[in-house]
Amino acid sequence: MTRAFASGFLAAAALAFLSTTAAAEPEIVSGPAAEPDCFAPWTPETKFFKFPKKEGPYRIALANGYIANTWRIQMIQTAKAYAAQPDVAAKLKEFKVVSTGEDVPAQISAINNFIDSGYDAIIVNAQNPTAFGPVIKRAKEAGVVLVAFDNVLDTEDAINVNVDQKGLGVLWANWLAKHLPEGGKILEVRGVPGTSVDTDRHNGIQETFAATGKKWDVVEVLGKWDDPTAQKATADAIAVHKKFDGITAQGGDTGVVQAMIDAGHPFVPFGGETENGFRKFCAKHAGEGLKCSSAGTGPAQVAVAMKTAIAALEGQVVPQSIKLPLAIVEDPNFKEGEDYYPDQSDNFFVGNAFPTCGINFTAQEIMGQTKENQ
């Protein structure tokens, strides 16, 4: 009888565990999403999730990796500003922020700690798209909503929120090809190594150049999306190679242009990101040859990721992969007070809003927050 009782108890426990696990997983349902203008599916084949509804308020954590550039700092500030907005704050019991640097195991450990601590949802800007398999599985089994943005995860067991990063590289390369129809020597200032954003943008650039059939001599340097780092890398490249016919940079673009000015390098066509300082330069020096395509997505995509997590916790239908629009402006259409702001910091990323999601910020809201862990 004792053995039979034990066997029955173990079977019941196993059944209970399986039932809990199954209940924690999202149901695959038909679209559209609860807010289709905001939660746009990546492709017509994108799956739609419906998580079991949880009662709020919620405990949500942001597990960031790399922090040492303007975009990441503004992203952290934007996340805190969004969490502080009254209608969002009313749904949050706690909002926690941790940045772990470029150490992938440290970021994974932070996510594991949040799971163990009972957080309802975790937002992540992943240092590596493929290294998170076990922790993704743990989050799924624990019923934790996991939302990756910007540098997303190579999985269909988490929600991904992003722009078409490869398409952004294609856009910049096409801009240079338009202005350099016979090809030429290009300086490519890359981002943080190992991240999906850097890889996707680089691949878009390289594949587009190759498709033109023209000769492109591309010199790659590491800028880490950071003005001082990109400025030094550009200065060193100019010192060695003397002259480039065009430039594309994933970030730190203000520093790249400053290096050109300091070295007396002639202005050339440039495909770059959306920093306010870069756009100031583009507007000021367009007549001297700095013909710019400025495109990207502002750090406010973290707010879309947070909004998505809350919607999922509320039991709303959301796509597994959400595609965000790019903020694009190209020469000769840079408008003061709309596309760039002379009185604002050079380090401020313009276009930091997603109106279709009801997400808008003033510079004061963002700059009033800190980059520190909380």
Image (cartoon, rainbow, N blue to C red):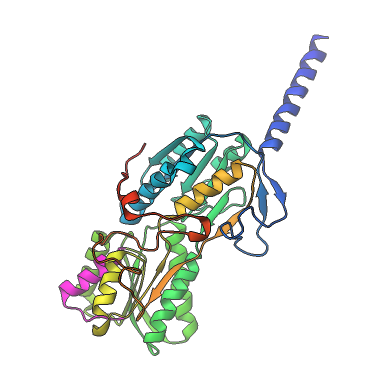
Q: Residue at x 73, y 23 (%)?
A: 13
Rendered location of residue 171, percent (x, y): 45, 75
Rendered location of residue 143, percent (x, y): 61, 37
Q: Residue at x 44, y 71 (%)?
A: 169
The answer to whether 212 is drawn above or below residue 95 in the figure is below
Left or right for 61, reference 41: left
Decide whether residue 280 is among the magenta residues.
Answer: no
The answer to whether 88 is drawn above or below residue 248 in the figure is above
Front residue (pair 261, 242) = 261
Does residue 102 show up? no
Rendered location of residue 206, percent (x, y): 44, 74
Front residue (pair 344, 159) = 344
Q: Main secondary structure of the magenta part?
A: helix
Q: Residue at x 39, y 54 (%)?
A: 361
Rendered location of residue 63, percent (x, y): 44, 43
The answer to whether 64 is drawn above or below residue 57 in the figure is below
Q: Which residues are magenta?
A: 252-269
Left or right for 123, reference 189: right
Decide whether residue 257 is among the magenta residues.
Answer: yes
Query: Which quadrant holds residue 273?
Result: bottom left
The outermost residue toward the front is 86
Left or right for 104, reference 49: left
Front residue (pair 300, 164) = 300
Q: How many marks?
A: 0
Query: Which quadrant holds residue 54?
Result: top right
Q: Quadrant of the N terminus?
A: top right
